[in-house]
Image (tube, rainbow, N blue to C red):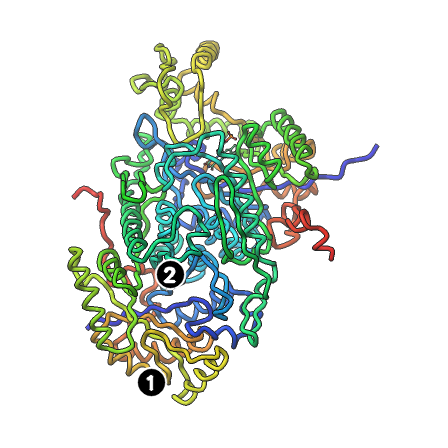
Amino acid sequence: MTTKPRKQIHLGVHFPGVNNTTVWTDPRSGSQIDFDSFEHLARRAEESKLDFFFLAEGLRLREHKGLIHDLDVVGRPDTLPVLAAVAAVTQHLGLAGTINTTFNEPWEIARQFASLDVLSGGRAAWNLVTSSDAFTGENFRRGGFLPYAERYERAAELVAVARELWDSWDDDAVSPDPVAGAYLRPGSVRRIDHVGKHFQVRGEFPTPRGPQGHPVLFQAGDSPDGRDFAAATADVIFSLHSSFDDGRTFYDDVQARLAAAGREPGSLKILPATTVVIGDTEAEAAELARHIRSQQVPGATAIAFLEQVWGRDLTSYDPEGPLPDVEPDFDGADITRGRARHFKDPRPVVAAWREQAAANGWSIRDLVIAVTSRGGFVGTPNHVADEIDRHVQEDASDGFILVPHLTPGGLDDVLDRVVPLLVERGSFRAEYSGPTLRDHLGLAHPDAVRRPAALAG
Amino acid sequence: MTHLHLAVDLTGSGAHPAAWRTLDPEQLRSAVATLAAHLDTSVRAGFDLALLDDSLTLAPAADHTVRGSLDAVLVASRLAPVSSGIGLVATVDTTHTEPFHVAKALQTLDHVSSGRGGWQVAWSTTPAGAAAFGRKDVQDEADAVDEAREVVGVVRDLWDSWEDDAEIRDAATSRFVDRDKLHYVDHVGERFTVKGPSITPRSPQGQLPVVVRVGSPESVGLAGRVADVVRIEARGVDRAAELVARVRTAAAEAGRDPQDVRVLVDLVVVLGADDGAARARRGLLDGLAGSAFAPATLLHVGDAASLVELVARWAPVVDGFTVRPASLRADLPLLADQVLPALRAVGLAADAYPVRTGSTLRDSLGLPRPASRYAAV
Ligand SMILES: Cc1cc2nc3c(=O)[nH]c(=O)nc-3n(C[C@H](O)[C@H](O)[C@H](O)COP(=O)(O)O)c2cc1C
């Protein structure tokens, strides 16, 4: 029997988001804006030799019932300047930023990522998201124009142009010749001339190529189009398929798409988001997880969640009481805007929930806690380390993006108590093997993939 | 008497186009470390602010200058956690960028620098800029400046779109923010619309200082309307006085207090131990460039003492100077060790940093922190 070599786990930390995973009522909850919070999480992640630090993005404040949603954390700083600042206080940690492909132009965004890669010594990653709704578009020059079907088309063209721009500089273009007065080696920067459906981009790109050649590309989007786009384009998929069975299915699906795209197995890492709750005993961890879930869903949040499904105001209902007896308003437009959650026809959902609530004796709040639960790892450090390792060794994922529930210290215990166990098992690095995020993720330099002859020569 | 406001321009290798040709190529390749060292020297000097210029296009090879640039807001953000006291002012274009992105990027610079961010407004009238973005025709100066006015306006609205106390964290009602203190900017202009509010809470300074360079007649109007700091170029003191008066008139015409605008004249310096040494340095740089360096503004070639005299002579006419060292490597240390201490000794420059650490750029510029324009009074 041949034994498969042990896979190395990849781990990132997600800065707490603007949703109800993040608990802000806890006395330990700090600022989601002050740089100290970003620095805390980044430094702790680097001390534990994690692969990267991750920021999400949303380009319009969420609304509920026509008003700005006020129950969750609201407001965050801009992704790329934060990552540039984090680069100053870390040396190895990858810096992954979510940046929308619909509301950015290739010249500028390619320049910003090249800048971040240079400023961080080769640690930049771009999480490509395609949100294209007219609601968000109201903040941008082009307005809300992009049909859903075209969002991955635009994303693909945007990435193709960005790669052309990054490739238009040779790695060693900056080789100043004071005597000749040539700052760049002659011929080392090529004009580009792109004319496509979405973009016309012409000229000499002003920004040097970063150490990674191209920043690492992440993709987060779950539709078939999204998966194909990832298989064709991305280095990492950020998914929500964190449970074992779901993860296995997703992993196989993506491997098939990867092969169809003609790419090598292993050249696309699959990293689901997950939460981790640990305790000294299984019972203690379970109790803590229940407590956190309850903090995440206060009564007002439970009602607001039901309103998304019912499509109507339910504030007169007691969150600790039974489910609303009124029927959902299924003709009503989406009453929540600025986040991806759609129930096409709410009636079957409501019927199933009524059944569940009746069977378990659940209140509105109990139900919402149950149905919005995304699982995650709960247990002793040993148990959680075993589970994470099993998911990776058995190809339910290549690692995880750890999502804390507290800013900024929510992952301290996981980093301190679980990661060392993964190192002991030989599944996670004890030291960084190189300076760039490509090194951490085991990804080849783009030139080695696309121009192997040029590198060999 | 109030002291002068002193800025330093850290762009490239210095103001002289041949400055890079006297440097070790290895140092040029590690641009970030080199710039961080220059910023340290600028902090030691006690400059109020450092300017990081930027361009969306590549300088032509025929100019024989430094070629290639990084996004200035990201550079400033990278430098923020490893510096203190000094303002970090980044150039950002208004012609081809998204006002919403510009607003939150600069707010974030202000957050990560604890209130030391600033914005040098740029606009683009070149075919190269238009071709790079491919979504607009080339604009002339009047049109681009007018668009810059519109962009600065909406950016300032977005900066105020969260009132300072919008975040309430009220567990009793489960409300994280008081949404009555978040405001749509509802900008509907000739060129674009922006709904708002910003995704980013109000930053430490509320409003970052806005720097406008005056060149064209149109830009004088823009400076008067929107700028906190105005950069002028003048070779003689009379010309400087005339430009200062025009800027202040433009500010008054825009309904502002003309004294709220800080007018700084660009001052290019080539320093040496004595006048002869300074002239020799200039000769060397000019020789490398193949032509005599002739900036369109005040140029000092001489020792530190005569520079201090020059500054004292001009001090009654302007609010301060934007010092542009001909070579950052050669001139910055002399500014830090000789010129600024001498200016401080005669009361022309502000106290050194230890006294001012923790202050914001607005504090250094003597600008009060404004309340949000949307705050109920
Ligand atoms: C794990 C995950 C994280 C995401 N994070 C963001 C985000 O931070 N910002 C954003 O605008 N969209 C985010 N999205 C939305 C996706 O980019 C995409 O727009 C959305 O999933 C719709 O695409 P799809 O139909 O392919 O799923 C995320 C999606 C997933 C699955």
Residue tagged 2: B88
At which x and y percent is residue B66? 49, 67
Callout 1: few (<14), some (14-19), or many (20+) C-alpha neighbours within 10 Å?
some
* Callout 2 and callout 1 share a chain: yes
Kindly indicate whether the residue at mark 1 contacts the one at mark 2 (C-beta within 8 angstroms): no
Question: Given the image, on which type of amino acid does mark 1 rest?
Answer: Ala
Q: Quadrant of residue B199?
A: top left
At which x and y percent is residue B231? 29, 66
Residue at image location 28% in from the left, 35% down from the top: B179
**Label 2 beta carbon less than 8 Å to ligand 1:** no
Does the image show residue B87? Answer: yes
Along the viewing direction, whichever of B92 and B47 lies nearer the viewer: B92
Relative side of B233 to A22, left or right: left
Quadrant showing the N terminus of chain B: bottom left
Sequence-earlier tag: 2 or 1: 2
* A292 versus B96 height, above or below: above
| Chain label for disc 2 | B
Does the image show residue A412? Answer: no
At which x and y percent is residue A438? 62, 49
| Chain label for disc 1 | B
| Image label count | 2
Along the viewing direction, whichever of B219 and A174 lies nearer the viewer: B219
Question: Given the image, on which type of amino acid does mark 2 rest?
Answer: Leu
| Badge 1 element | helix
Residue at image location 59% in from the left, 65% down from the top: A186
Q: Which label number is shown at residue A317?
A: none
At which x and y percent is residue A217? 57, 43
Quadrant showing the C terminus of chain B: top left
Residue tagged 1: B305
